[in-house]
Amino acid sequence: MAPTRARRKTGSTGEPVESRDKQLLLRIFETMVMTRAVEDRMVSMYRSGDLLGSLYTGHWHEAISVGTASALRQDDFLAPIHRDLGAHLWRGLDPAQVMASFMGKATSPTRGRDGTLHYGRLDLNIYNLPSHIPDNYPVAIGAAFAFQYRSEDRVSLAYCGDGSTSEGNFHESLNIAAVMKLPAIFIVENNQYAYSTPVRLQSAVKEYAVKAQAYGMPGVTVDGTDVLAVYDATSEAVVRARAGEGPSLIEGVTMRMHGHAEHDPADYVPREMLEEWQKRDPVVLFENVLLEHGILDEEIVSKMREAARQKAIEARKKALADPLPDPATVEEGVYAD
Amino acid sequence: MQTDNGQVTYLDAIGQALMSEMEADPDVFIIGEDVGQFGGAFKVTKGFLDKFGPRRVVDTPMAESGFTGLAAGAALLGLRPVVEYQFADFISAAFDQIVNVMARHHYRTGDPMPVTLRAPFGARLRAGPTHSQSVESYFAHVPGLKIVIPGTPEDAAGLLISSIRDNNPVLFLESKYLYRRLRTSAPLSLEPMPLGQAKVVREGSQVSVITYGAYVSECLDVAAELGKEGISAEVVDVRTLVPLDVETIVASVKKTSRAVVVHEAARRLGYGAEIAAVIQEECFWWLDQPVLRVAARNTPTPTSPPLEDAVVPQAAQIAETVRKVATA
């Protein structure tokens, strides 16, 4: 499917594009392009049998993952899920390590002990979550607690999907964070489906941001394909959190354009729905904004996309050549010293 | 908190150990339901709020999973949380966070996870099926967790200090039956005791009685009674279920050639099954008798006294089994 060149104004209520930090805009765009390039490459790797199991991608979540991560400092804590590769790349994770994770290589962040989407690195202030989502929510409020405990002005930001909002950990975390006024930001990536379950079977409330009210925190729904809208909403929440005013919830509305994972053809998704969302590719939308404002030109864009493609190809080569872990080490590290 | 001659209860020993660790290390804090102003469901943290303030004595909403995960996240950022559950029975609400978030974390990532999970557990208080459970076997199956069950006030203090200083999640199960029943025989020492060491608490030659928790003192009483009949029973207090001190257990059984494992948890897949299996793997040829278990029946723990007494091991039942194995 060739992406449609949709032209659309940003829905951001923030400052005009021309008065924003140009370097920041370029870095955001470059990371979104890189995220797409790495995931597209991994889809072909999945198809050609390079990967151990299935592949979870974040197509159409790039504006959320990068828009949020770029509004934080490097020392803020992130607790992403499997749609948020962009947040990891923003922090500096090597794409080869992501691929190595899906291949069980010794060079993956878990040294092959975990795999697939479990590539978070604490040295990048990113939590490596288990498969149980949103188990990362309580952990994220724990990081926020530690910042409050030490009177640091760092914040903690956690992601989950629409399905996760039905879990007890979602509720408990929002409630605790609000009661304790923790510097936490909760992102709900509403991508219309939790595996095959559509949002109408997940929640009687259509706007997930409404749920924030019940906990006593601000909640806002933004266009999850509009990176500047996501960035602005996150920045607002960050200001609140750093000022000790407590947590916020942001719902980013987007679409899961692939199956739950690549093994899933997602036949339960109506064709027309995908066609409609196809027009709202967040990478293309942001590209158009930058073109419109003369921050980029077509030539630079195509160079950036090609550079990202080459980097992804190089990352694959590296990951393929990386060693598998030594089975003699399998019992090491069950316990810390 | 203590008598004139310096004796303290099992409960106060835990409180004093926790307090000394909080005094020594500003990264240690206590979190749980009603631990602040109320001083905890059993009053282990009585006076802590006044001493340390609400930053380090953290009352939470009623959300075991949420505050357990909070502790995990705080530990990743370098703090050393001590989590209190009002009853071990309620820890099931936090099972996912303990098993999937905490226990696997170091193996997956190499990051330390220094959390101590304190939970009062066990029966004989007429508290019924959902307030009397022994939860150790659920967790003993999970790699990455340590499990400590002290049987004396001295061990409760020393092992709690080591648990808090450990870089792994430690499930510290407190016998609520012992809270106010046992006292130290001397002023309490607040020195750490290493995890993973069982202790021979009574020397004997004819049979090894291997036990932990509230049944340590029970088995010592039984052994003393059997001594009057001329039966010499050795009592081994396991103290740390994970990691298990196989060496001390095996040395005892090789000496006596007979073993009985005693615990309050239900018999089926209770921790005694593991100990019995280890014994037959390590010293089958030294055994003169099959290893027997004295454990609770495979029922929930009923409330009414005659029913509860019929379920959890009684002294007479322990004595009968030990006598049988020792003299057969």
Image (cartoon, rainbow, N blue to C red):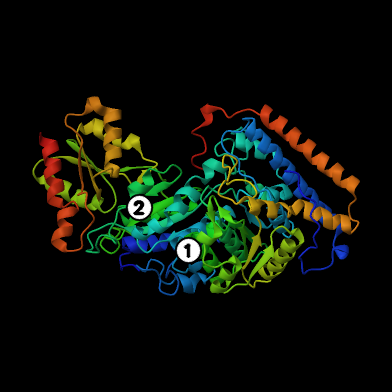
- Residue that protrudes farthest toward the front in the picture: A272
Q: x, y percentage for residue A159?
A: 61, 57
Residue that appears at 51% across and 35% down: A332
Q: Chain of mark 1?
A: B
The disc at residue A294 is none
- Write down the residue under mark 1: B30
Total labels drawn = 2
Residue type for callout 1: Ile
- Write down the residue under mark 2: B155
For the question of whether residue B245 can be seen, the reply is: yes
Q: Is residue A11 above or below residue A110?
A: below
Q: Relative to A174, is A157 on the left or the right?
A: right
Label 2: few (<14), some or many (≥20) within 10 Å? Answer: many
Q: Relative to B263, is A131 on the left or the right?
A: right
Marks 1 and 2, how far apart in space? 20 Å
- Judged from the image, the secondary structure of the residue bearing numbered disc 1 is strand
Residue that appears at 63% across and 33% down: A47
- Judged from the image, the secondary structure of the residue bearing numbered disc 2 is helix
Q: x, y percentage for residue B273?
A: 27, 39
Residue type for callout 2: Asp
Q: Relative to B283, is A51 on the left or the right?
A: right
